[in-house]
Amino acid sequence: MGGNGAGRGFDHEKILELNGEGENGSTKSIPPCCKKAIAAMPESEAKCHATVVSGWFSESRLYSDKMGKLLYYNNPMWPGEAHSLKVEKILYQGKSDYQEILVFESSAYGKVLALDGIVQLTEKDECAYQEMMAHLPLCSIPSPKTVLVVGGGDGGVLREISRHSSVEIIDICEIDDLVIDVCKKFFPDLSVGFDDPRVRLHVGDAVQFLRNAPEGMYDAIIVDSSDPIGPAQQLIEKPFFETIAKALKPGGVLCNQAESLWLHTHLIQDVLSVCRQTFKGSVHYAWTSVPTYPSGVIGFILCSTDGPPINFLSPINPIEKQKGALNFRRELRFYNSEIHRAAFALPSFARRELSSLIRA
Amino acid sequence: MGGNGAGRGFDHEKILELNGEGENGSTKSIPPCCKKAIAAMPESEAKCHATVVSGWFSESRLYSDKMGKLLYYNNPMWPGEAHSLKVEKILYQGKSDYQEILVFESSAYGKVLALDGIVQLTEKDECAYQEMMAHLPLCSIPSPKTVLVVGGGDGGVLREISRHSSVEIIDICEIDDLVIDVCKKFFPDLSVGFDDPRVRLHVGDAVQFLRNAPEGMYDAIIVDSSDPIGPAQQLIEKPFFETIAKALKPGGVLCNQAESLWLHTHLIQDVLSVCRQTFKGSVHYAWTSVPTYPSGVIGFILCSTDGPPINFLSPINPIEKQKGALNFRRELRFYNSEIHRAAFALPSFARRELSSLIRA
């Protein structure tokens, strides 16, 4: 994922300041020893980042409220749970105009990219997300030629699109060029995607880009966005999907990051409902395992515009039959045609909640 | 899961004691303020359990080493990562002859059962584990009559087996009767499984039980064990599988809890390899999403003995065609025949590592 983050970062200094003694007598709810423990935490212990406590990174994390009370930050997208990773070394931290960017080496999942404190990718499991995101749509249409990626500044989805030799143009619209630069430095296995001469990079706002895109330009549009809180909220609203539908060819397809079946059923229902109104072809939900995402899964909404019918459930353009695709730049790690078909099997609880919104 | 835990618990008092000042001068590596912060933590804050810090439960957790240094406990089965749940209320804590038992109300996943600090089930996602564990084997054989469950003291797998009206005998061998009692009190939706008159409870060691089981007694054996560290180690060794194969009818099936594809490939290879030697029919690996298990997935090894061939990939005895099965006691929440077939689709990395050990 990448781009359009939500500005939810806390910085270490702010935590220390909020935990400082004296000011306006609001500190009685933290035992002084706790405040001291935090203030006294050596840099080597804190590893210089607010999300890293005692050498562990966590998406939910210690902070203090206005009254100075020490609390855990509860991410509003997945309240009440947190996944933590042991940090070997912080490799980069910086702030762009849009978000806080953190790169660290974890002991269990290799290098990790976090934006505003939320894990976007890890070296160990990025294969599942990037490969599914690219090949679910591109293997469902006969011979994709023009593809647009929204977000995806890490380059991983580009790398996967490159496996398709039928593709002639890969446009990417990423709002945050610092994400691109940081990934080029620390995630060369992903940013290699930018090296393809078919790639045309547009740094800017995707909403604007799509408003100006030529009608019927793309065979596939892949929305690789961060969670829909803050600026990315626009990316799940009807006007945005309407510009996507307009920019797609007849029978063109959209693949949109679509959260967790376990945690976000209502959000998924809302987005599916908007997609059903906007896209006149098929509307489907697929999902896969990504251990470092909340609840360990991520979903994809797949839609097609009016035109030649698309059967997402059975890839018409199987990756195994495309010359050189399995090993282009690197071996496919996760995706295959069997996993493609399996991704559309929904648990019974999800079937009950989503099936009326799905259209074959 | 249940039973045969590994005694990896730490108790709160022990942590306080290890963090105490003075003794043998070993405390210099913890800043005194940190030690005080822990010692001063009010009961209401700690919520009375070592795994619960600032109101959050975590499988990896703060403790101190012999030198008094404050460390995170790194579970050897999933080093370097941890899933944490916000605790609303601790409902039960106790210690049996085998393990430490903890029940708490979480804000995100309902009630949670942890054995030796490891999440065994939560109300929100237990459906995925219990339903897959029971129906993957039982829907793969024509008309199961006799079933044995090893472990499974919570009763959830029994509840699922009960949906199959062909079943006449459900034996269960659970080592820890305190787990059964605690679940009867706090998890009535699972322990309802024990109310079925077909259930025969045997409290004791499964290794012993299987040694004495009549040859060719069972159509299906389901091993619902905890992780193979400590006593449960025996449950992944060849002699144990040999007693299972002997206790099964020709064409009888085993379903064995089999960890995470993302984390435990070598362990899975080892167990598959033992199973290939022991079971002369099919040997397969299936997997599913369970958010509160490490890496968010859990696997199942499915094997059949010499006899009528079993095609695990396509359920011959679909749950949808069994009268009353979908709604017996409660609606199926996760499993259906499509999810059954999808569970055998392996990511490319896993195919490469496991396919030579799988036998159709």
Image (cartoon, coloured by chain):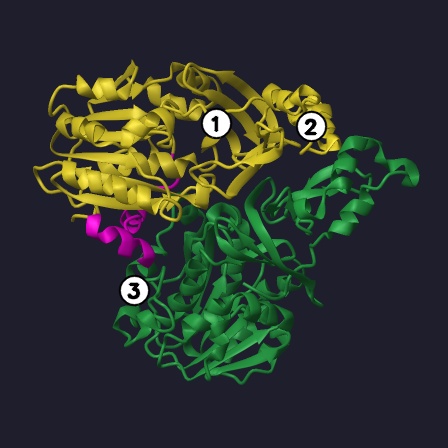
Chain colours: A green, B yellow
**Residue shown at the point (84%, 35%) measured from the top left:** A27
Crowding at label 1, few (<14), some or many (≥20) Cα neighbours within 10 Å? many
**Residue shown at the point (37%, 37%) measured from the top left:** B129
Give the residues drawn in magenta, as a range. B331-357
Which type of secondary structure does the marked residue at label 1 adopt?
Answer: strand
Task: State whether discs 1 and 3 lie on one chain.
Answer: no
Image mark for residue B38:
2
Q: Identify the residue position indicated by label 1 in the image.
A: B113
Answer with the quarter of the image where residue B55 lies. top right
Image mark for residue B253:
none
Q: What is the CA distance from the residue labelled 1 to the residue labelled 3?
A: 40 Å
Residue at the extreme left of the image, as rendered: B307
Q: Identify the residue position indicated by label 3 in the image.
A: A314
On the question of residue A8 being in view, the answer is yes
Identify which amino acid the numbered label 1 is placed on: Leu
On the image, the x and y values in percent for residue B271 come to 26, 39
Question: Number of callouts in the render?
Answer: 3
* CB atoms of marks 1 and 2 within 8 Å: no
Crowding at label 2, few (<14), some or many (≥20) Cα neighbours within 10 Å? some
Crowding at label 3, few (<14), some or many (≥20) Cα neighbours within 10 Å? some
In the drawing, does residue B276 fall left or right of residue B199?
left
Identify which amino acid the numbered label 2 is placed on: Ile
**Residue shown at the point (48%, 16%) measured from the top left:** B95
Q: What is the CA distance from the residue labelled 1 to the residue labelled 2?
A: 25 Å
On the image, the x and y values in percent for residue B130 come to 36, 34
On the image, the x and y values in percent for residue B228 come to 35, 32
In the drawing, does residue B169 fall left or right of residue A60?
left
Which type of secondary structure does the marked residue at label 2 adopt?
Answer: helix
Q: Per the image, is A190 magenta?
A: no
Q: Per the image, is B333 magenta?
A: yes
